[in-house]
Image (cartoon, grey):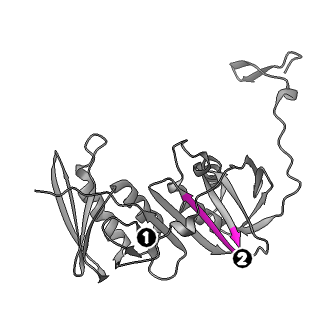
Amino acid sequence: VDDRNTATITSGVSCFTIIGMDSEEFPELPKITDADTIKMPQELLKSMIRQTLFAVADSTAKPIHQGSLFKIENGNLDVVSVDGYRLALRREAINYANNTEFVVPGKTLSEVLKLLKDSEGEVEICPSRRHILFRIDNYTVISALLEGEFLDYKSALPKDKKTEVTVSTRTMIESVERVSLLITDRLKSPVRCVIGEDTVKLFCTTTMGRATDQISAEISGDQLEIGFNNKYLLDALRAAETDEVRLQLGGPISPMLVLPKEGDAFSFLVLPVRLRSEM
């Protein structure tokens, strides 16, 4: 590098000359000095981000929802994402005594997800008032936090259920994928689910044709017919990462909750689509 910051790179007969910049012009990283350190297994954080990142909003209509809320209360960490059509909540107990909350941009979490391992190892999370720092092995990720009022997710989760369906996650995904073959970016149509006695019938109709399928399930409560955006329904089912899921429904126009077969480690809310009567 010469005194004009021009770098020359040579390798054998190859030679590159690249114009550089003065290092003094590189932006100074924010100093995070007032933050407590939250420690947790890398594998756990990776799972929590992976199961909620799909519901982060793409729209700039409400910038706060372009990130995921991290809320620590009474030793439990909730990671929450919402985009106006669906909500993803993942909950785990962690070893941290204080109560705090902050919103991390989805783009930052996408990069953190790439660095986290599925094996043993610890990640350190240091949130300050405006920034957050992740220490993952030899990597340090620093990001600004999002500011604003996040959705009150606890009140958004439906409390009443009239129907509960326990079904194989893989079987449900494959069935929705089959009836979605007639749906394209140009030909959009909801997936119609008819929940009866021990069966869920799925239908989809577009100008291309009509697809039907049927799967077995354990069903309690009222029979009903409800429609969903196929992408939103598939995203929630794929994020479950369990062999079976519980689907709780309050009626044909009420949101559906996707839960594990036992417990409440995750809760995925999917809004229904109003169905038109078919001839």
| Observer-nearest of 3 and 78 | 78
User: What amino acid type is highlighted by mark number 1?
Assistant: Leu
Location of residue 222 in the rendering, given as x and y in whole percent from the top left corner: 28, 80
The residue that mark 1 highlights is: 257
Residue at 59% x, 65% y: name it. Answer: 48
The dominant secondary structure in magenta is strand
The local crowd at label 1, few if under 14, some if 14 to 19, many if 20 or more residues have their Cα within 10 Å, is many
| Observer-nearest of 106 and 64 | 64
Q: Which badge, 1 or 2, is on the more N-terminal residue?
A: 2
Location of residue 24 in the rendering, given as x and y in whole percent from the top left corner: 88, 28
**On the rendered structure, is 36 left or right of 242?**
right
The residue that mark 2 highlights is: 75
**On the rendered structure, is 39 left or right of 227?**
right
Residue 225 belongs to the span the image colors magenta: no
Q: CA distance from mark 1 to mark 2?
A: 24 Å
Residue 74 belongs to the span the image colors magenta: yes
Q: Residue furthest left?
A: 279
**Which SS class for mark 2?**
loop
Q: Which residues are magenta?
A: 72-81
